[in-house]
Image (cartoon, helix red, strand yellow):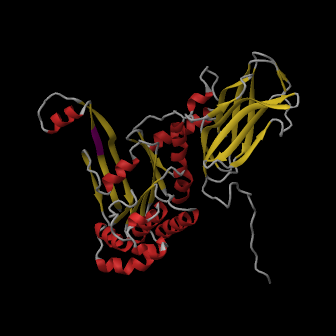
């Protein structure tokens, strides 16, 4: 039984050349078309069955949030129809509908009423909401006095503790501090265990893999495919590096094309295309050095030989760094480092640590350093840095450094504490 049905939905926005053209079109003063049509969604169709947890994945601007807003009634489709059978609680824009002059308590009742609940139903849930938000006596103060952390805690607590039949989540499980995030995910798991229907949008591919029964991949307003989270993540990884499958193809066709490309890929192609052209690079990269050597290309390659910056935890991956030498340098050091998005070094190595002596690199020559390893970092987002350094006599020299040149996404369905997984083998036995 489907509780959400999306049938041939289009969402079209008019992009006007000027405000004058917008007014003229609104008032019907001209028959000439002074706008371009932007299709945020094109012929979008899918359904969600009762008790399913379905993930929506895709790049920024692909239309994920737009379709959620149409399903929840925030937006209307230009064409097509959406039917929903069940009471929805949507975590889209936390705090939307809050009155900044009202106290936390008053906003709980205001927001609950907007979600379709009576005061009596909110009374029954009030203690649970307050306990989940855990902001103490601040709940009796106007929310305009709240810190941003307290505000999102209260907004999330209201939305998550109302008892919906359908939960719709758009990137809302990463609010607050780590302890509150853990509480949010625990509540999310309780919803899943209770057999609630969940439609879930996230850039956290590990969460999609862990929680979802099925995933739908959207790109540039089109539904590319739907299937198991693993299959959809594999195709999504290709889209991230510009290897887009045929849009509008059926899931089976897309997965078949993906499997074929994996089989045929052994190493990055040597067709003159720069490896780094397959990635979205950091426009604010911190680059410096004395210029005696220059990093001219680099790549991250998964165990199937594909260019990607999304690596499955537990799999083997390779980082390549190509350096052009502008002068003779003896024993340069090639380096690789991964940091959290907050700038904390997680791990790294270099050719000196690995006792890989490069020898004399002459002017005009190019060398490629290849780092191959197993991915044991926890699921999440990291920043990669590479460099070519060395010693001029006793003095350490940075020839070329690219700090935070690109991001790497670790996809994981099981995380432990900290930054990396010890891959522990665990057993528990009863003492006789």
- Residue 196 is at least partly visible in this image: no
Q: Is residue 398 left or right of residue 27?
A: right
Q: Residue at x 28, y 40 (%)?
A: 12
In the image, the segment drawn in magenta is 9-13
Q: Is residue 139 left or right of residue 333?
A: left
Q: Position of residue 410 (x, y in %)?
A: 62, 48
The quarter in which the N terminus is drawn is bottom left
Q: Is residue 404 left or right of residue 92?
A: right
Q: Position of residue 346 (x, y in %)?
A: 70, 49
Front position in the image: 102 or 414: 102
What is the chief secondary structure element of the magenta stretch?
A: strand
Q: Is residue 194 left or right of residue 13?
A: right
Q: Residue at x 35, y 59 (%)?
A: 96
Outermost residue, bottom direction? 432
Q: Residue at x 52, y 60 (%)?
A: 211
Classify residue 217 by image quadrant.
Answer: top left
Q: Is residue 12 magenta?
A: yes
Outermost residue, front direction? 145
Q: Position of residue 134 (x, y in %)?
A: 49, 73
The quarter in which the C terminus is drawn is bottom right
Q: Position of residue 164 (x, y in %)?
A: 37, 69
Classify residue 349 by image quadrant.
Answer: top right
Classify residue 159 by image quadrant.
Answer: bottom left
Outermost residue, right direction? 393
Q: How many marks?
A: 0
Answer above or below: position of 271 versus 388. above
Q: Is residue 178 magenta?
A: no
- Residue 83 is at least partly visible in this image: yes
């Amino acid at each position: 039984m489907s509780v959400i049905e999306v049938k041939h939905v289009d969402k079209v926005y008019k992009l006007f050349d000027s405000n004058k053209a917008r007014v003229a079109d609104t008032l019907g003063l001209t028959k000439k078309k002074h706008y371009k049509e932007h299709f945020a969604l094109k012929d979008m169709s899918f359904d969600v069955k009762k008790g399913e947890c379905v993930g929506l994945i895709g790049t920024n601007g692909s239309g994920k949030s737009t379709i959620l807003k149409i399903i929840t009634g925030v937006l209307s489709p230009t064409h097509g129809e959406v039917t929903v059978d069940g009471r929805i609680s949507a975590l889209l824009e936390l705090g939307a509908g809050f009155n900044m002059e009202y106290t936390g308590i008053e906003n709980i009742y205001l927001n609950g009423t907007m979600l379709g609940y009576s005061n009596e139903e909110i009374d029954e849930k009030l203690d649970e909401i307050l306990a989940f938000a855990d902001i103490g006596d601040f709940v009796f103060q106007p929310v305009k006095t709240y810190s941003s952390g307290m505000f999102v805690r209260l907004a999330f607590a209201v939305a998550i503790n109302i008892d919906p039949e359908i939960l719709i989540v758009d990137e809302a499980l990463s609010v607050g501090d780590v302890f509150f995030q853990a509480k949010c995910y625990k509540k999310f798991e309780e919803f899943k265990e209770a057999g609630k229907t969940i439609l879930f949008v996230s850039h956290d591919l590990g969460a999609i893999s862990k929680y979802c029964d099925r995933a739908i991949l959207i790109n540039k307003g089109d539904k590319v495919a739907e299937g198991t989270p693993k299959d959809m993540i594999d195709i999504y990884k290709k889209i991230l590096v510009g290897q887009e499958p045929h849009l509008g193809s059926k899931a089976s066709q897309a997965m078949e094309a993906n499997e074929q490309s994996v089989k045929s890929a052994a190493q990055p192609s040597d067709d003159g295309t720069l490896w780094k052209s397959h990635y979205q690079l950091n426009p604010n990269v911190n680059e410096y050095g004395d210029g005696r050597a220059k990093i001219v290309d680099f790549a991250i390659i998964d165990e199937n030989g594909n260019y990607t910056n999304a690596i499955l935890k537990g799999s083997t991956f390779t980082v390549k760094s190509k350096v052009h030498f502008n002068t003779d340098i003896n024993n340069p050091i090639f380096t690789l480092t991964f940091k959290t998005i907050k700038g904390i070094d997680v791990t790294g190595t270099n050719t000196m640590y690995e006792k890989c002596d490069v020898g004399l690199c002459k002017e005009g020559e190019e060398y490629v350093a290849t780092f191959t390893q197993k991915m044991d970092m926890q699921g999440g987002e990291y920043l990669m840095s590479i460099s070519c350094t060395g010693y001029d006599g006793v003095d350490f020299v940075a020839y070329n450094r690219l700090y935070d040149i690109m991001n790497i996404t670790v996809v994981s369905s099981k995380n432990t504490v900290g930054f990396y997984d010890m891959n522990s083998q665990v057993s528990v036995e009863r003492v006789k």
